């Protein structure tokens, strides 16, 4: 959700229960404008909020020229002061999965995870040793944000284009999806490097436009039915909600360039989804 139009865009997801009070809107718009200037971002979006037991984390993301290669994530607890989060490495993400339960709201807090390792000796003798792993909440936070982005962050087809140099930029000729297109899951794409696209045959890729069809469509997501689509205001607004990461909402106003998304949740994945469908 573009920070420059946050006061208007946030109303599009109001029916889902996602709201900001006037003080929060004012603080976010002012602080994110300053952050954009300080870090020399080309664009800053309000990503959402991850609720904690003691404090909540407000999340923003800043983009450079390349929307895939130049992205930084920031967090704030008061909507005014922002701090950079470290990039989520594979090792960090793997370790973060060991932390269970809700976030506390303290970036310096450390979760303790104990693993029992079995060491085989001579014959059938087995020695058990305990290994304690400490997981910092800041690392868990950046890992969860990266996982949510990878799983459910979406954009309309054609909103971004890939240059021959490999850079991903906003498509200035994008005028929005029409109503019939907006009603199809194949019109929405994961805003990340493609995974399933690489597995398609040359015949399946024949009708694709390389400039805009460089991401995976959400129609192919597994399990099927992980997205809930609703039209509001007649056909003036379409929203998609993720059942995998409950709290993620995407919206688009058909026929316009207006679209965005926000996540308001506790940062826990719905692992029971396959049993709910």
Image (spheres, rainbow, N blue to C red):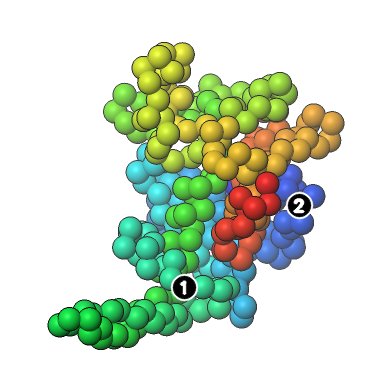
* Numbered badge on residue 16: 2
* Numbered badge on residue 99: 1
> Dividing the picture into quarters, in which one does residue 153 lie?
top right
Above or below 29: residue 139:
below
In the image, 121 versus 104, the foreground residue is 121
Q: Residue at x 42, y 82 (%)?
A: 112
In this view, which residue lies farthest toward the front? 123
Question: How far from the left and from the top, in percent, is residue 102?
Answer: 58, 73
In the image, 162 versus 272, the foreground residue is 272
Q: Residue at x 62, y 31 (%)?
A: 185
Secondary element under disc 2, as helix, strand or loop, is helix
Work out whether residue 28 can be spotted. no
Q: Residue at x 62, y 78 (%)?
A: 53
173 relative position to 272: left or right: left
In the image, 115 versus 42, the foreground residue is 115
First along the sequence among labels 1 and 2: 2
Secondary element under disc 1, as helix, strand or loop, is loop
Question: How far from the left and from the top, in percent, is residue 190?
Answer: 50, 38
* Numbered badge on residue 161: none
């Amino acid at each position: 959700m573009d920070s420059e139009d946050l006061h208007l865009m946030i109303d599009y997801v109001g029916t889902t229960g996602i709201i900001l009070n006037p003080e929060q809107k004012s603080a976010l718009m002012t602080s994110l404008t300053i952050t954009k200037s300080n870090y020399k971002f080309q664009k800053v979006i309000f990503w959402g909020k991850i609720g904690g037991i003691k404090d909540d984390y407000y999340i923003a993301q800043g983009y450079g020229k390349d929307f895939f290669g130049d992205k930084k994530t920031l967090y704030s607890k008061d909507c005014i002061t922002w701090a950079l989060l470290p990039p989520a490495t594979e090792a960090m993400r793997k370790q973060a999965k060991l932390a269970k339960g809700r976030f506390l709201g303290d970036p310096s807090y450390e979760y303790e995870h104990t693993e029992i390792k079995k060491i085989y000796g001579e014959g059938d003798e087995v020695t058990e040793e305990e290994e304690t792993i400490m997981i910092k909440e800041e690392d868990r936070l950046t890992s969860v944000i990266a996982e949510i982005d990878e799983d459910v962050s979406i954009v309309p087809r054609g909103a971004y284009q890939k240059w021959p140099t490999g850079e991903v930029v906003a498509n200035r000729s994008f005028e929005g999806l029409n109503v019939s297109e907006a009603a199809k899951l194949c019109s929405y794409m994961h805003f990340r490097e493609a995974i399933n696209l690489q597995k398609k045959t040359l015949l399946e890729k024949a009708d694709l436009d390389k400039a805009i069809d460089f991401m995976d469509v959400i129609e192919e997501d597994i399990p099927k039915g992980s997205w809930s689509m609703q039209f509001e205001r007649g056909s003036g607004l379409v929203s998609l909600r993720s059942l995998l990461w409950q709290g993620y909402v995407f919206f688009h106003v058909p026929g316009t360039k207006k679209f965005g998304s926000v996540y308001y949740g506790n940062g826990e994945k719905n692992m029971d989804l396959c049993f709910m469908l």
